[in-house]
Image (cartoon, rainbow, N blue to C red):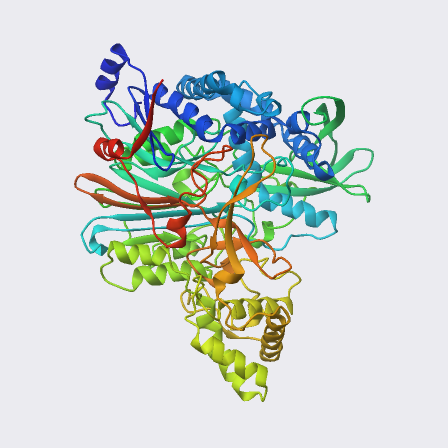
Amino acid sequence: MTLGISAAHAQALEAARSSAEILWDRYGVPHIYAPDDTSAMRALGYAQMTNHAEQVLLNIASARGEYAAFFGPGAGDRNVESDIDVITNDIPARARRWLKSGGSEQRALLKAFTQGANDWAQRNRATLDPAIARVLPVRESDALALYQLAIHYSFMGARGYANAAAWKKGKAVAGLSSGQFGSNAYAVSPARSATGEPMLVGNPHIDLGASGPQSSNGFPLARKGLFQWMEAHIVVGDAKNPGPNFTGVSFVGVPVLAIGFNDHLGWSHTVNAAQNVDVYDIALRDEQYRFGDRRLKLKERPAGVTVCAFGGSSCVQKDFTVAYSVHGPVIARRADGHALAMRVAGLDTDRPVLQYWRMAAASNLKSFEKAFSMLQMPYFNLVYADRSGRLLYVDGGVRPVRSSGDYDSHRGVLDGSDPRQLWTRTVPYARLPRVLDPAGGFIQNSNDSPWTSTFPAALRKADYPAWLTFDLMDLRPQQSAMALIAKPKLSAADMLASKQSTHMVLADRWLPDLFEIARQAENTELKEAVEVLSRWDRKADAESRGAVLFDRFREAYVNSSAPTPNSTPTTPPSLFAVPYDPSRPLETPVGIGDRSGALNALVHAVRALRAEGRALDVPWGEMHRVVLTQRDETYRNPRIVGEAPSSGSMDAYGGLRLVKYTPRDEQGVARANAGEGWTQFVTFGSNGARGEVLLVYGNATRPGSPHVADQLPFFTEKRLRPSWRTRDEVEANTIRRERL
């Protein structure tokens, strides 16, 4: 299959084969023009190394389980722990198996991508620090190992590892954590568009990775920068008269075109709540455990990792044994004789590169869904729109078929002795929650459940197993849906204003009650707080005055009933007068649930700010900053290359412009470390797709690159930049070109 051209055209091009060309624009985006698929993939590998060589190789070292061999044990042996985890979960060996089982078409794409990466390294090895260059050459299986580490064992595995950490402390389930992942995506049909043109917004939220604030001047620890996006534009065929051409992003080191659009269609993903990684408690005696009415012995295999001083000297081999139960590998043990085994769904999804290449090549809903339904991506929601006006939402992923129970009953550590808890089948694509062309003319997802993906609702929870997913619409997706419902026709300006909204829905739900009870109290501090919050615009824009006070109030209020402020995606239900009600998804939760606790929290917030020498109406951007960093040629010593006041708040507040922050420093300032990264806004017209995009932390991480902070001004000004897609647009903005 060739991206954007017919099979006959592809054969003709193959007969008159020419080299690929890369035109680099002024934001460091490669525009790849290639005669065929493999030439395009080779150019993509070359381009990723051009912009991210060090980061690609560090990610590969992590995915091979060899980080400690190349770069030392790391602080607290964290590199060693990462390598042991990778080897315990058999990631490198499985990647080699996938390389064979994934078929010849995918193998050709991986071979080309790897060749392009190694071609760059052969020409430019001298620009790499020798310690990093030792990871070379890139292998064909590396991308598949890196894909597993990022998707199966990071996105999916986050819940399992959180439960494992809680289990080590004797708890049965970890608290829900917003972590580093989230996303917004929505699309409108021609009937709801002011111009009659379908529109699509995609906005995944991941950490700022290698370019965000750094905690140390030393060498990065394993897995740092694992989720670094890189934008690329790929045209396969005749560059003067191209067929559909693709713009989108992939993780560096992985040739999976994860999110993007061509002239016919586009898609985005959002993190869903698929419970496809389970952990099982098993009680051991002489390395045996009970499973039903039987006693089984753990299976074992020898394993090991190499640990060297930085750069590869003074190495020692750290041998260990990987034990397996019927559930999966043992990932933790306790002194009381209990062990924890982990089971991961989707370990047979061996063709992800092929699936996404076919999705990028699709020209209509039928061809796209044929590719997407391969289910080689075991996680994520899908939000899709196309030029003909079709809309599609799928609560996707590889989902275990459970024998009983509801969603919450499988959220924590499971009983490994109960055979009913061991799943062996997964939900077929046809049984996943799916919405096609809804009556309301829009679809949306901001990490809420599928039942609220459109209004009026197109799915009924009762039609699906109780264990399949959760039932919650948090404040952020509520704002998304309310913006899409607000007008009968939506313009591009409406869509962009919604995407950039920092409005705190939580303030709407709490302030009326808070004002009422605060005014009843005879307290000067409360009176001053009410005056500030009454004048506040209820936004988290950089210049917003009152948002910091509200943030400190919420933190103190939540802390009165929960141990860690801002650690959950939803504020504890007890703190609302009316908790979330699935029958009123756009109106609840609402009201102050603990009136006395709220008053105490507001007083605490006032005193805390004054103790720091801050005004109660200190601007949000004075206390919340975006800081982008770049490392030197040894990939150490990060220095700040971009800094600006931040606009955007955390999950709990309900703003669509999501920014998560580090803990406050001694001056009370927090720095963005996750959230806004890639944004795409696409309009599908009669002549193809028009796009506006942004990658907040820039399209490169290499030392000395000018493309780390060059897009930050757009973010500060709440704007996107144009996506240049026609040859004339690209030529007009080209600063350098290469022919491979």
Residue lying furthest left: 686
Name the image quarter holding residue 417. top right
Which residue is at the front of the view, 161 or 119? 119
Image coordinates of residue 590 in percent, x first then y, are: 48, 72
Residue at coordinates 41% horizontally, 38% vertically from top-left? 429
**Residue 532 shows up from this direction:** yes
Q: Is residue 382 left or right of residue 176?
A: left
Image coordinates of residue 320 in percent, x first then y, are: 75, 27
Q: Looking at the image, is 338 positioned above or below residue 566?
A: above
Residue lying furthest top: 15
Q: Looking at the image, is 197 positioned above or below residue 1?
A: below
Image coordinates of residue 501 in percent, x first then y, are: 38, 60
Which residue is at the front of the view, 642 or 277? 642
Image coordinates of residue 677 in percent, x first then y, are: 44, 46
Name the image quarter holding residue 257. top left
Q: Looking at the image, is 208 positioned above or below residue 460?
A: above
The N terminus sits in image quarter = top left
Q: Looking at the image, is 532 positioned above or below residue 273?
A: below
Residue at coordinates 35% horizontally, 39% vertically from top-left? 260
Q: In this view, does 318 lie to the left or right of 422?
A: right
Residue at coordinates 30% horizontally, 40% vertically from top-left? 723
Disc count in the image?
A: 0
Q: Is residue 475 left or right of residue 367?
A: right
The C terminus sits in image quarter = top left
**Residue 140 shows up from this direction:** no
Q: In this view, does 55 lie to the left or right of 244?
A: right
Which residue is at the front of the view, 678 or 621? 621
